[in-house]
Image: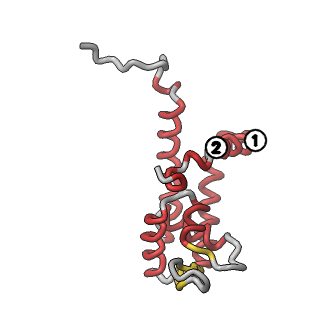
Amino acid sequence: MTHELQTEFPDASDSPGLALWRVTHSWQRAIRDALEPFELTHMQFVLLASLTWMDRSSPVTQRELADHVGIDIMMTSQVLRALEGKGLVERARHPSDGRAFALEPTATGIALANRANAAVERADRRYFAPLGASVAGFTRQLNALDRPHARPHETGR
């Protein structure tokens, strides 16, 4: 029996999946470090910042927020409860859909989202600095991979 992995890649570093895995985890460490002073997890930050950014001319639902961020509705609900417990988000029954919650960041939540976002953007600039002028193209390539059919929560998979 052979103990060698059968692969098309002559070197592990040639695998785009492994490279993405490693980069994702090192970037997440950088973001965790940036968020530590704000006592926010990465997921809490993403939901709070996204809710603060989204147009609230009509009530934002948990589903809309989950879809915007690209995560499962149950995970969204759990994280929103934590943010609500910290006084950063308010959840109320939706005015026209009794099954849904309308979400609103509190004034404290908005202020925290803005301070944390500045720290995250600084961390991103430092992390992606080795890409130089290529960062915009890299972002476009990442967006090309972020297709709706790749999100299991949207397709029921």
Judging from the image, the colouring scheme is secondary structure
Q: Which mark is residue 12?
A: none
Which quadrant holds residue 45? bottom right
Residue lying farthest to the top in this orientation: 1
In the picture provided, is 138 more to the left or to the right than 37?
A: right
Residue type, numbered disc 1: Ala
SS category of the residue bearing label 2? helix
Q: Nearer the viewer, residue 46 or 93?
A: 93
Looking at the picture, how far across and down is residue 36, in whole percent? Answer: 47, 65
In this rendering, the count of numbered labels is: 2
Residue type, numbered disc 2: Leu
Please indicate, yes or no, whether residue 36 appears anywhere in the rendered image.
Answer: no
Residue occupying image coordinates x 48% and y 17%: 10
Residue occupying image coordinates x 63% and y 46%: 128
Residue occupying image coordinates x 53% and y 77%: 100
Q: Is residue 15 above or below residue 139?
A: above
Nearer the viewer's eye, disc 1 or disc 2? 2
In the picture provided, is 60 more to the left or to the right than 90?
A: right
Please indicate, yes or no, whether residue 133 appears anywhere in the rendered image.
Answer: yes
Q: Is residue 32 above or below residue 89?
A: above
Q: Nearer the viewer, residue 152 or 138?
A: 152
Say which label, 1 or 2, has the lower sequence index. 1
The residue identified by callout 1 is 133
SS category of the residue bearing label 1? helix
The residue identified by callout 2 is 142
Looking at the picture, how far across and down is residue 54, in whole percent? Answer: 67, 70
Which quadrant holds residue 134? top right
Contact? badges 1 and 2 (CB < 8 Å): no
How far, Cα to Cα, is label 1 from label 2? 16 Å
